[in-house]
Amino acid sequence: MTTREGYEVGYDAAGQVRIIEGSDRSDADAAPVPVDGLGCHSGAEMEKAARMAGMSDILDQYAKDYPQGPHDKPQSMCPAFGSLRVGLRMRRTATVLSGSACCVYGLTFVSHFYGARRSVGYVPFNSESLVTGKLFEDIRDAVHEMADPDRYDAIVVTNLCVPTASGVPLRLLPSEINGVRIVGIDVPGFGVPTHAEAKDILAGAMLNYARAEIEAGPVQAPVGGKSARPTVALLGEMFPADPMMIGAMLDPMGLAAGPVVPCREWRELYAALDCGVAAAIHPFYTAAMREFDAAGRPIVGSAPVGHDGTAEWLKNIGQAMGVAPDRIAEAQNRFLPAIRGALAGSPIKGTITLSGYEGSELLVARLLIESGAEVPYVGTACPKTKQSEWDRQWLEARSVKVVYRASLEDDCAAMEAIRPDLAIGTTPVVQKAKELAVPGLYFTNLISARPLMGPAGAGSLAQVVNAAIGNKARMDHMKAFFEGVGEGDTAGVWEGDPNLRPDFRAQHQKKLDKLARAAKAEEMI
């Protein structure tokens, strides 16, 4: 670990790369760029600028892969955080960001907050270097400087919003430098709805690169060697114990669990593409599935979650791999009784609303229902895909309303209307629930950080869910104690009573009503 005065601590060789400073000329003297100063929430303006800059092909592909819902901008954290985490988790992989300094700072901060002990490269820019093309030259110089085959297998360069909207052409970077692969991707907030789908962008780009290498000739075997059995590649990040449990359930059929995509090192990409079938545990990995399709690998949706899910998944995997019916039945008979017993031994009683942006929301809802809970609403920020269809049908057959591309407003409205015993969701949903004295659990940290597959997952949620439901009396007591504090006119810090001006409010409301009438009249023209 090295420390240099004026720089953040670097955890690996990426932190020793010279920072590209660009031009000494100030922004005030440089030619203005229409997109400079706009961010991912600028929506149509940023997209318009990107298309004018020649990025239509990429944006059209993203629109096809990740169709947007009722909102045209991210409601979770910056989407690029997803692809950044994928790169930071891979061994011998360097990551470089190109974007506004504030965006890079936030992404770097949150990546270290989540435990990435590795430096994030950054190529800064100003208005002049952006408009003259100097930024692309700086990026090219940076990757040439970093391309050390003794340290890296690959360097991932990511364009954030402003470079994407300005048309910085990462596709023109060399595909390889000194034996180090160069992977350039664009992850703009105005084209990628969630950070979960940004993981797919990088996973798909790496699989595409690896597939081309395989087609060109022999490639390196995985560190652990090639499996003697046909393998099932697993799409989607999951709890570390889940792949092992899936492997145990596949064993009676003569199959093995393959790599989890996104992978942890480059060689695993080859092994993943060498699978017999790809299992879309998280069903929104569209770009990755496209690569498996191109490699001639069938794709099976859903996951071995709960009794019904495990029975159906094992059958579908076995049939896709040509396994004899008796061996499929052997796997089912070995694990289904254990799952049924675990569900019965860890019952969940209560009404739960569920929402999130990880992509496993439908799977968790199925597990909760088989554990005895009533789940009237499931919202996921991810899109509807063919691979999640069976989960949707199973849930709707049990009177569950499933909302794909659910907005924060959808999730909060469902929670407020139902007033469940427990609300599982994102931070703002949980915050709103607690304001209403409804117990809440944050999906990402407290639910998806538990095993879900097979017998291990069958009883994993009961303890934390039942404990949260049991906190209802405490929530009621807290709400009664703090009733009225920090709400409405008393929000903020006051030494005395606030000065209320209802006349100002009435005047401002008239302006808002006038603007609303004008907007409605314009729509009717």
Image (spheres, grey):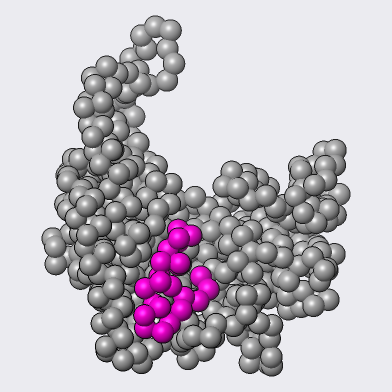
- Residue nearest the observer in this picture, 330 or 432: 330
Up-down: is 252 above or below 349? Answer: below
Residue 284: x %, y % from top left: 41, 69
Near-viewer residue (370 or 335):
335
Residue 224 vertical placement versus 264 (above, below): below
Instruction: Using the rendered image of the protein, determine whether residue 489 is visible from the camera's viewpoint.
Output: no
Taking the spot 57% from the left edge, 47% from the top edge, the residue there is: 114
User: How many marks overall?
Assistant: 0
Quarter containing the C terminus: bottom left
User: Quick check: can you spot residue 302?
Assistant: yes
Q: Residue at x 31, y 91 (%)?
A: 324
Where in the figure is residue 482, as x and y percent of width and height?
Answer: 29, 18
- Which portion, as a residue range, is magenta? 238-260
Left or right: where 84 falls relative to 522: right
Task: Indicate the quadrant where residue 254 lies.
Answer: bottom left
User: Measured from the top left, where is residue 117 in percent x and y?
Assistant: 67, 49
Q: Is residue 403 magenta?
A: no
Question: Toward which corner of the image does residue 389 lie, by quadrant?
Answer: bottom left
Residue 165 percent coordinates (x, y): 60, 63
Furthest residue in direction top, as rendered = 496
Above or below, comparing residue 356 to residue 207 in the picture: above
Asked if the magenta segment contains residue 248, the reply would be: yes
From the viewer's perspective, is 369 left or right of 99? left
The structure residue drawn at horizontal position 53% and vertical position 58%, both measured from the top left corner, is 82
Determine the residue positioned at 81% across, 71% down: 149
Q: Between residues 277 and 318, which one lies in front from this camera angle?
A: 318
